[in-house]
């Protein structure tokens, strides 16, 4: 599966494998005039051949009517319309903050990471979204 951390400027993308139950960062796409780069998304879907897509739902204290939530739902609907794949929404509250914290920890441990690189944060947030979905939907 492919997972997306949707934002108006960038979309973090991760790949997940239900067989192993793991997720990994893939890339960050830059939106074109605040719209998804559908060509690059199509290329990723063609390359990875996912069975499903996961989109992070930025709930704020359970509120699914905030602007970010509405934008993520619209993106999910457009994914389904464009690619005819199952699209699942996953609560992503705190994934960006967790991603920042994890990258900071990696730097402190001497791992080479770029400081506060928004693209790295977006990819890692997408990875956390997919991992949460896999953990919650494991059919073992």
Image (cartoon, rainbow, N blue to C red):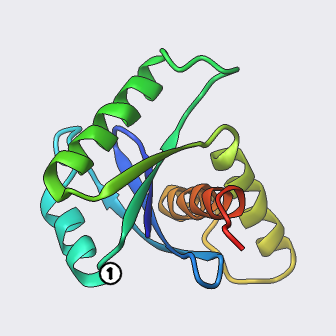
Residue 56, image x, y percentages: 51, 45
Q: Between residues 24 and 33, which one lies in front from this camera angle?
A: 24
- Give the camera-side residue of 118 and 96: 96
> Quadrant of residue 116 in the image?
bottom right
Where is residue 125? Give x, y as percent: 59, 56
Q: Is residue 38 left or right of residue 119?
A: left
Secondary structure category for the residue under label 1: helix
Which residue is denoted by mark 1 in the rendering?
48
Picture quadrant of residue 108: bottom right
Q: Taking 30 as reference, is 108 left or right? A: right
Q: Would residue 118 appear left or right of 100 to someone viewing this image?
A: left
Mark 1: give few (<14), some (14-19) or many (20+) Cα within 10 Å.
few
Q: Residue at x 42, y 19 (%)?
A: 67
Q: Which residue appears at 25% of the width and 83% of the height?
A: 47
Q: Position of residue 118 (x, y in %)?
A: 51, 55
Say which residue appears at 27% left-offset and 73% top-offset.
44
Does 71 sit above or below residue 131?
above
Residue visible at 39% across and 59% down in the picture? 53
């Amino acid at each position: 599966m492919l997972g997306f951390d949707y934002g108006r400027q960038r979309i973090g993308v991760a790949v997940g494998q239900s067989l192993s139950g793991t997720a990994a960062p893939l890339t960050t796409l830059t939106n074109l005039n605040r719209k998804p780069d559908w060509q690059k998304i199509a290329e990723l879907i063609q390359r990875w051949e996912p069975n499903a897509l996961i989109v992070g739902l930025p709930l704020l204290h359970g509120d699914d009517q905030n602007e970010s939530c509405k934008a993520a739902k619209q993106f999910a609907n457009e994914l389904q319309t464009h690619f005819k794949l199952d699209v699942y929404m996953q609560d992503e509250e705190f994934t960006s903050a967790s991603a920042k914290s994890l990258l900071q920890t990696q730097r402190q441990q001497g791992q080479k990471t770029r400081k506060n690189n928004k693209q790295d944060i977006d990819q890692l947030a997408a990875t956390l979204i997919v991992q949460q979905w896999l953990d919650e939907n494991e059919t073992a």
